[in-house]
Image: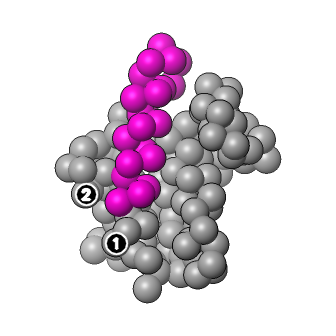
């Protein structure tokens, strides 16, 4: 069983906070006490989640107003039992942060066989497409781990 899940994207303001919030909103995740957190490979600490992402999650009754971006660290990766990234290249980037991470880093969209590209500063329809993939991917991971 996984007790600590780290979700990673580029800046930790769009995709990874969305996935983190969706995992945390799941009853099975909460009941099992699974810690879910997120970080960015190129994040600047302390930024709020993207306003479009915040609004899309609010439409589902999920409040991420307290989210603040964090830069990934080797310690975060080492403590996590499962690391989920958005794009294939990010698997390699996580390995640069912590070379011992191989084997526990997977695509969030693994079970859909998709990469989830960054919607940042694009049309709302692109955000909604990414949000749909993130939601489906989170649901698939929950089925596998719970």
Instruction: Identify the residue at horizontal 38%, vertical 64% (top origin).
Output: 141
Q: Quick one: SS at disc 2?
A: helix
Instruction: Identify the residue at horizontal 60%, vertical 31% (top origin).
Output: 56
Q: Quadrant of residue 103?
A: bottom left
Residue 41 point in image, percent of width and height: 49, 48
Image quadrant occupied by the N terminus:
bottom left
Residue 1 position (above or below residue 73):
below
Q: Is residue 130 visible?
A: yes
Q: Is residue 76 visible?
A: no
Residue 57 position (above or below residue 66):
above
Residue 43's label in the rendered image is none
Q: Earlier in the sequence, mark 1 or mark 2?
A: 2
Q: Write down the residue under mark 1.
A: 144
Q: Quadrant of residue 96?
A: bottom left
Please tell me which residue lies in front, 16 or 72.
16
Left or right side of 22 for 51:
right
Q: Count residues near mark 1 (Cα–Cα under 10 Å), then give few for <14, some for 14-19, many for 20+.
A: few
Q: Quick one: SS at disc 1?
A: helix
**Colour scheme in the image?**
one colour
Residue 111's label in the rendered image is 2
| Structural distance between the alpha carbons of marks 1 and 2 | 9 Å
Residue 87 point in image, percent of width and height: 32, 45
Q: Quadrant of residue 75?
A: bottom right
Left or right side of 81 for 51:
right
Residue 70 point in image, percent of width and height: 65, 51
Q: Which residues are magenta?
A: 118-140
């Amino acid at each position: 069983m996984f007790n600590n899940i780290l979700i990673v994207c580029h800046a930790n303001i769009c995709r990874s906070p969305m996935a983190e919030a969706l995992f945390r909103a799941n009853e099975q995740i909460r009941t099992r006490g699974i810690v879910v957190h997120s970080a960015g490979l190129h994040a600047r600490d302390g930024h709020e989640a993207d306003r479009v992402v915040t609004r899309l999650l609010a439409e589902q009754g999920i409040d991420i107003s307290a989210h603040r971006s964090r830069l990934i660290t080797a310690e975060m990766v080492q403590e996590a039992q499962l690391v989920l990234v958005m794009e294939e290249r990010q698997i390699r980037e996580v390995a640069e942060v912590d070379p011992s991470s191989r084997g526990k880093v997977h695509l969030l969209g693994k079970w859909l066989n998709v990469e989830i590209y960054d919607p940042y500063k694009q049309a709302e329809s692109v955000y909604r497409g990414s949000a749909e993939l993130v939601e489906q991917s989170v649901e698939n991971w929950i089925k596998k781990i719970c």
